[in-house]
Amino acid sequence: MKKHFTQITLLSGLLVLATTSGRAADSTQGAIDFRESVMTTFKWYVQPMGAMTKGKIPFDAAWFKSRADGLASATRLDVSEGFPQGSVGESEAKPEIWDNWDDFLSKYQRLQDEAIKLQQVAATGDEAAMKEQFGKTAQACGGCHKKFRNKK
């Protein structure tokens, strides 16, 4: 009876360990999926504004404002949740993120601040000011990419 109990206990322990390891792998991939989705959302809002500021498409103040509003809202997400320690995985994230965590968070805070300013400026309808603030916002976004992102 003791031998049977020991075998069941050992088997149960191994199942818990396997399940926990599976969850860790799932959570790492889930974190990667989350952060990539957030970045794709940013891209959704940024691309048309960039095209407008570069004259690639006609400037539309109402559309620009809606994109600025969306970006400001999206940057309120806590993207740091998508970067648990060591979750490089098959992603564009550089390991330097975790070695320079405070800098990473500071760069994201700057993006949040600049996106809010962009939203405020876009509400004025002043095309020149919108383009200028978009440049600052894009620079904040790119500042993080240059240091912490591997290019595809």
Image (cartoon, grey):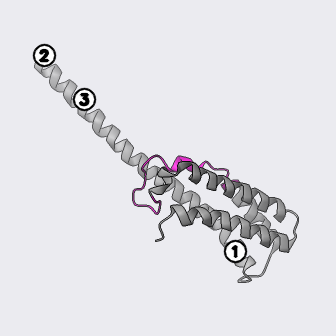
Q: Is 139 displayed left or right of 87 in the figure?
A: right
Q: Specify the amino acid type for callout 1.
A: Gly
Which label was assigned to residue 76? none
Q: Is residue 70 above or below residue 26?
A: below
Looking at the rendering, the stretch of residues picked out in magenta corresponds to 73-94
Q: State the residue at coordinates (61%, 64%).
A: 143
Q: Specify the amino acid type for callout 2.
A: Lys
Q: Quadrant of residue 136?
A: bottom right
Q: Is residue 5 magenta?
A: no
Q: Secondary structure at mark 3?
A: helix
Q: Secondary structure at mark 2?
A: helix
The residue under label 1 is 50
The residue under label 3 is 12
Counting residues from the N terminus, which is met first, the one under dot 1 or under dot 3? 3
The main secondary structure of the magenta stretch is loop
Q: State the residue at coordinates (37%, 47%).
A: 25
Q: Nearer the viewer, mark 1 or mark 3?
A: 1
Residues under labels 2 and 1: Cα distance?
Answer: 71 Å
Task: State whether residue 63 appears in this view.
Answer: no
Q: Secondary structure at mark 1?
A: helix
The residue under label 2 is 2
Q: Is 30 displayed left or right of 37 in the figure?
A: left
